Image: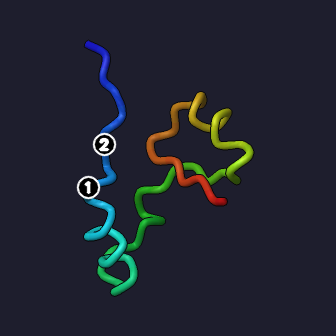
């Protein structure tokens, strides 16, 4: 059964506050980092967790 990407936007404020407060380290779940211009190609590689940086 195919699955889509989760809609994470509603959780953003709580997650960002946890990162800022030092309670959560996002590097523990990030498998790929790409600059904004490479984001589409990086998504096609289907990484577990992509972080696109503007």
Q: Image check: 37 left or right of 19?
A: right
Residue at far right of view = 37
Q: Residue at x 37, y 76 (%)?
A: 19
Q: Image check: 49 left or right of 37?
A: left
Q: How is the image coloured?
A: rainbow
Q: Quadrant of residue 26?
A: bottom left
Q: Quadrant of residue 24?
A: bottom left
Instruction: Label 1: state its secondary structure.
Output: helix
Q: Quadrant of residue 3?
A: top left
Residue 33 drawn above or below residue 15: above
- Graded by Cα atoms within 10 Å as few (under 14), some (14 to 19) or many (20 or more), the crowding at tag 1 reads few
- Graded by Cα atoms within 10 Å as few (under 14), some (14 to 19) or many (20 or more), the crowding at tag 2 reads few
Q: CA distance from mark 1 to mark 2?
A: 8 Å
Q: Residue at x 31, y 49 (%)?
A: 8
Q: Which residue carries the number 1 mark?
A: 10
Residue 17 drawn above or below residue 51: below
Residue at far bottom of view = 21
Labelled disc at residue 7: 2
Q: Residue at x 33, y 53 (%)?
A: 9
Marks 1/2 in contact by CB < 8 Å: the verdict is yes
Residue 42 position in % (x across, y down): 63, 38
In-front residue for pair 28/7: 7
Residue 54 position in % (x across, y down): 66, 60
Instruction: Label 2: state its secondary structure.
Output: loop
Residue 1 position in % (x across, y down): 25, 13
Residue 44 drawn above or below residue 10: above
Q: Residue at x 64, y 42 (%)?
A: 39
Residue 12 position in % (x across, y down): 33, 62
Labelled disc at residue 35: none
Residue at far top of view = 1
């Amino acid at each position: 059964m195919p699955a889509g990407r989760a809609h994470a936007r509603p959780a953003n404020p709580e997650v960002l506050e946890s990162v800022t407060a030092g309670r959560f380290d996002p590097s523990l779940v990030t498998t790929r980092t790409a600059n904004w211009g490479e984001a589409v190609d990086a998504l096609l590689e289907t990484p577990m967790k992509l972080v696109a940086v503007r």
